[in-house]
Image (cartoon, rainbow, N blue to C red):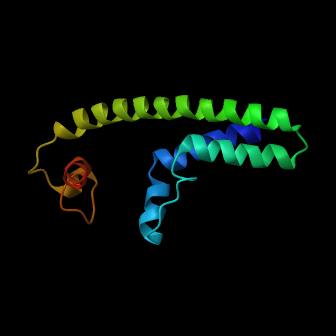
Amino acid sequence: MKELAAIVFAATAVNHLGLISAVEKTIGMRLPLFNCPKCLTFWCSLIWLATHGAGVTSVVAISLALAYAALWLELAMGVIDHIYYKIYDKIYSAQSDDEAAADRGETDTDGTLSELRQTSG
C-alpha cells in the first residue's frame, strides 16, 4: 500500500516541480505519457499492481482511483505553492534592494530569488 502512495506522490511531484518538462526540453521530444500526473500515476500503478498479482478488475479500478487521487494532490500542491509565494514575497519584498547580498546570505547572484523568478517566468 505504501508503494502505491509513493507512486502517486512521485508521479505528481515530478510533474508539479517541472522535472518532466525539463526532460522534454533536454531531449527535444514530448512525453505525453509522463507529462501528466494522472497518466503517469495510472500507468505506473497499473504496472506495479499487475506485476504484484492483483486481479485485472482490481488493477484497473485501483489505478483509476489513484489517478483521481493524483488530480487532488496536484491541486493541493498548487495551493501550497500559492501560500508559499505569498509568504516569500512578504519576506523578501520587505528587504531593500540596496542591501548587500552578503547581509542576506546570498552568494554568486546579482539579485534576490524573487527578482529572478519574476524575470524568468
Task: List x then y, in percent, for residue 84.
Answer: 36, 34
| Quadrant hosting residue 83 | top left
Q: Is residue 113 visible?
A: yes
| Closest to the observer, 53 or 78 | 53
Single out the residue that lies furthest toward the left.
98
Task: List x then y, in percent, for residue 36.
Answer: 52, 46
Question: 65 left or right of 19?
Answer: right
Q: Is residue 10 visible?
A: no
Task: List x then y, in percent, for residue 45.
Answer: 72, 43
Single out the residue that lies furthest toward the bottom.
27
Residue at left offset 64%, top offset 39%: 8
Is 28 above or below relative to 112?
Answer: below
| Closest to the observer, 74 or 114 | 74
| Closest to the observer, 110 or 47 | 47
| Quadrant hosting residue 88 | top left
Is 2 above or below relative to 113?
Answer: above
Residue at left offset 68%, top offset 33%: 64
Image quadrant containing the N terminus: top right
Is 103 above or below relative to 70?
Answer: below
Figure disc tally:
0
Residue at left offset 64%, top offset 43%: 41
Task: List x then y, in percent, for residue 105.
Answer: 28, 54
Residue at left offset 55%, top offset 43%: 37
